Image (cartoon, coloured by chain):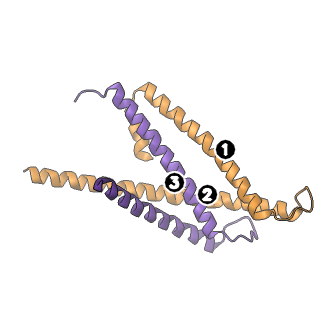
Amino acid sequence: MNSAMEGMEDLPEAQRNALLQKIEELQVRDSLRTYNSVVERCFVDCVSSFRSKNLDSTEERCVTYVLRKVFEACARVGMRFGEMSSQSEQQMQQMMAATGTARQMIKR
Amino acid sequence: MASPTEADLAKSLAMAQQELDYRVDLFNRMTSSCFEKCMDRRYKDGELNVGEHSCVDRCCAKYWQVTGIVGQMLGAQGQGM
C-alpha cells in the first residue's frame, strides 16, 4: 500500500484525482459491506429464538459484545496486516536490490 | 527515456486499482477468518481476552504465510503454461 501511495505522487493531476476518487469509492463500498457482514455476524451468533418479535435483553447485550469484539479484532488484524505488509515490501526491495547488484556484477 | 504515454498511465492506474481491490479483499477475508477461528462464541464480554489476542496474532501470521505459498504456486503454474 505504501509503494502504491508513493507512486501516486508521480502521476499527473488528473490521474491522481481519479485514483483518489477510486480509493474513496472503495472505502465507501467497504464500509457498507462491513456494516452488512457485522450485522449478519451479530444476528447469527446472538439470535436463536423467535418467541417474540423483539430482541430480549440477553440478545441485545450479546449484540453489543459482538460489535465490540469485532471492532477490537479488526483493529488488531489491521495492525498485524500493516506490519506484515511493510515487512514483505522491505524483503522485496532487498531482493530486488540484491538482484540488481548481481546483474551488475555479471555484466562486468 | 520518453515520458509515459496516455495508454501507459491508464494501465498503471488500472493496475493500482486492482492492487487496492486485492488488498482490501485480503484484509476483509483475513479478519473474517481469524474472527471465526479465534473468538469465543459465548460472548461473555465485549473485549478480547489474552488468548484471543495471541490467537489473532498467530492467525494473521499463518494467513499471510498461506497467501505467500499460494502466490508462489500460482506464479509457478502460470510460467509453466
Q: Amino acid at mark 2?
A: Cys
The tint of chain A in the picture is: orange
Q: Residue at x 49, y 64 (%)?
A: B63
Chain letter of disc 1 in the image:
A
Label number found at residue B26: 3
In the visual, does B60 lie left or right of A102? right
Select label 3 or label 2 by which is in front.
3
- Secondary structure at badge 1 equals helix
In front: label 2 or label 1 = 1
Q: Identify which residue is drawn at 82% across, 65% down.
A: A48
Give the secondary structure at mark 3: helix
Type of the residue with mark 3: Leu
The crowd level at tag 2 (other Cα within 10 Å; few <14, some 14-19, many 20+) is: some
Residue A63 place in picture, x, y as percent = 78, 60
Residue most extreme to the left = A108
According to the image, label 1 marks what residue?
A32
Supply the letter of whichever chain is purple.
B
Q: Position of residue A33 (x, y in %)?
A: 65, 47
Given contact means CB atoms under 8 Å apart, are the residues at marks 3 and 2 in contact?
Answer: no
Judging by the rendered image, the residue that carries numbered circle 2 is A74
Q: Label 3, label 2: how many angstroms apart (C-alpha)?
A: 13 Å
Q: Is residue A87 left or right of residue A68?
A: left
| Chain letter for mark 3 | B
Q: Check the residue under mark 2 and report the chain it is in.
A: A
Could you say where residue A62 lies in the image, as x and y percent from the top left? 79, 63
- Asked if residue A59 is positioned above or below residue B20 in the image, the reply reads below
Residue placed most toward the observer, A78 or A38:
A38
